[in-house]
Structure formats: C-alpha cells, structure tokens
Image (cartoon, helix red, strand yellow):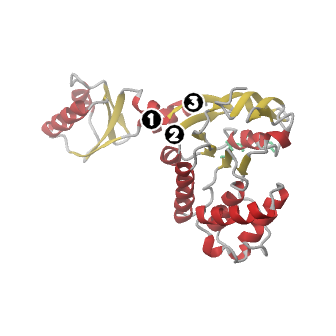
Amino acid sequence: MSTDSPIEIVDLRKEYGSFTAVNGLNLSIKKNSFTGLLGPNGAGKSTTLKILTHLIKATSGEAYLNGVDVTKDPKAALTNVGTVIETPEFYPYLTPRETMRYVGELIGMNKESIKTETEEILEKVKMTDWGDKRLGTFSKGMRQRIALGQALMNDPNIIILDEPTSGLDPRGMAEIREVLKNLRNDSNDLTIVMSSHILTEVQDLCDRIAMINHGTLLMDDDISAFVTSHGVKSVIAKTTEIPTAELIDRIGQLDYVRSAERLGNDVQIFIGDSNEERNRLFNDLAQMNAGIYSLAETDKLEETYLDLIKESA
Ligand code: ATP
C-alpha cells in the first residue's frame, strides 16, 4: 500500500437491509492533504467515516489507514488516527485536563506525555483557561473543541472529522475552523479528512475536495486546480424589471458571450474566464441601458457541485 495515501478506500459497500448507503466507493486521500468529503444529506459521508473509524462494519470492500485494513485489523489501523465522529459525549463532571488524562491512559500514553501533550493541545484548541472547569457547563462549541483536542492526543498523523461544525452557532463554527486552519499550518505530517455538506466551509479549509452522492465518488481533485480548470465563468445580472427575451437575445449575441439565459428574474451569462471578457461584458451591459443594477460572478465550484449532484440524482 502506497505511503502517499494514508487513507485508501477500495470498492467499499455498506448495505442497510436492501438500501445501499455506500456503493462501491473508491478514494485515495493524499498524504498531508486536507480533504473535504462533500455531499448532500444522505450521500453516505458519515457511513464512510464510521466504517473508516470502525464504528460500523462494511458489507464488503477495504479501507486502509496507514496501510492497514481497518476492516481486518482495526486496532492496528487506528493506532495513529484521531477521530471526531458526531459530537462525542463527555463525562460532564470531568474537566478538560481530566478528560485528556482519561483518553491518554486509554490509548496507553505515559503520564509525562499525557501532561505535556494536554497543555500543548489545550493551547491549540484555545481552551487553556477552561482546563479545570467542568465540561457539563460548556457550550456545544467548547465541547467540540475538546472533542478535537482529544483526537489530537498522541500526535496522530491522520485526523478524521465528521461534520465538525454541525449544530454550532456562527461563532462556534468560526472557532473550530480557526483551530483546524492552525492545526494544518503547524503540522508537517498530518492528513485530515473532514465531511461537510457546506461547500464554502470546504473551500475555506481544504486543499482537496472529494464529492460523493448515493455512496459513490463523483469527483476528487485539488480545489485550486478544479476552480481554474473549467475556463468558463458565470455572471448573474439583476435587472430592475423581469428580463425580456429580446434583452437576453441581445446579450447572447455579444461575440464573446458563450450563452445567456433567464434564471428566475435574473440573467445568467456565461463568458470566458478572463478579466478582459468580464470588463467588456460590464461595459456592454451598461451601454445597453437595460436596467441592470447589479452584476455578480457566481462561484464555479458551487455550480459544478450543484450540477454534479443534479446529474447523479
Ligand atoms: P448527513 O449529512 O445527512 O449525515 P451523510 O452523507 O452523512 O448525510 P449517511 O449518514 O452516511 O449520509 O447516510 C447515508 C444513507 O444511509 C442515508 O439515506 C441514511 O438514511 C441511510 N442510513 C444511515 N444509517 C442507517 C441505518 N443505521 N439504517 C438504515 N439506513 C441508514
């Protein structure tokens, strides 16, 4: 098994009775990448991550962590892996320091390492000042930071996160994202995979994106390569009145415009991905006197995501 892919999923299937949640999934996660496993609700993300972390068993297929198949030898496979699957329950009467000690002892760390790592980790998840307060009094966002913290015990080289910001308020989400960004920037040997159904979150945090739906892989690419490889950008023009067919026709006839179509009360215009074409479009639309009061470029990644999801429906 190649060490370039600390996580390797091969022909993975999970059936719940007659329902197939994961349908022959193949996915290779690159070493030191931060991969967003993106898909709509019910796509099979959690099921996949639960198989990877040995919370449930696959119906068939293989799932390697650091070269060891978790379906065959879960203990060895999970040795260097930190996980946060759903919001873990903690003992409410324990403090973060006590919780870390408990987790450290469970995974066989010695007392000295537990002490040192606990302080380092509390710093990383910005919970040092709360280290001796009982978890029962914490907000969900604070508990989630402790969940991340316990996943970091013993310096894993793989971290698996299932929707880590799910159910948090905007501030809680921002705090978790900041911790994840710092974690990534401060580590030389850390591969992170995180599921999410929020495209902007994946764009913000991850450098790779793997889209899944109905338990199969739709695409897997570098985010930056993906964003620049599609060559066409779409601009949404908002008009003061419902756009007429004549207006859409006139826009469509501009020589550099690939196509123009009505999108609700707006006009969606596809042009090439260059500043020159965008500037020409802005000028031409202004001269048309067509009551266009706003122009916004839409995110190609979002369009492609929605297209892929639609196609696979
Ligand atoms: P979400 O963001 O909603 O959690 P997901 O991509 O993580 O979506 P999964 O939780 O993996 O999706 O679920 C995939 C499909 O499998 C869903 O249709 C779900 O209803 C179904 N499913 C999950 N767990 C079970 C179960 N224990 N029994 C039966 N069906 C299940």
Tell whether circle 1 marks a residue whose Cβ is less than 8 angstroms from ligand 1. no
Say which quarter of the image contains residue 298.
top left
Check disc 3 and report the residue beneath it. Answer: 220
Q: What residue is shown at x 26% (from left), y 26% (from top)?
A: 257
Residue 265 % position (x, y):
34, 42
Mark pair 1, 2: CA separation: 7 Å
Check disc 2 and report the residue beneath it. Answer: 207
Helix, strand or loop status at disc 3: strand
Mark pair 2, 3: CA separation: 11 Å
Helix, strand or loop status at disc 1: helix
Name of the residue lying farthest toward the front: 112
Q: Relative to residue 29, is residue 134 depicted above or below?
A: below
Residue type, numbered disc 3: Asp
Mark pair 1, 3: CA separation: 12 Å
Q: What residue is shown at x 26% (from left), y 45% (from top)?
A: 241
Q: Nearer the viewer, mark 2 or mark 3?
A: 2
Helix, strand or loop status at disc 2: loop
Say which quarter of the image contains residue 290.
top left
**290 to the left or right of 21:** left
**Quadrant in the picture for the C terminus:** top right
Check disc 1 and report the residue beneath it. Answer: 224
Using the image as rendered, state which of residue 16 and residue 1 is in the foreground.
Answer: 1
Residue 106 % position (x, y):
84, 58
Ligand 1: give its quadrant. Answer: top right
Task: Tell me, yes or no, whether the two marked residues, 1 and 2, touch with CB atoms within 8 Å.
Answer: yes
Residue type, numbered disc 2: Asp
Q: Earlier in the sequence, mark 2 or mark 3?
A: 2
Residue count near mark 2 (Cα–Cα under 10 Å), binned few <14, some 14–19, many ≥20: some
Viewer can see residue 20: no
Viewer can see residue 238: yes
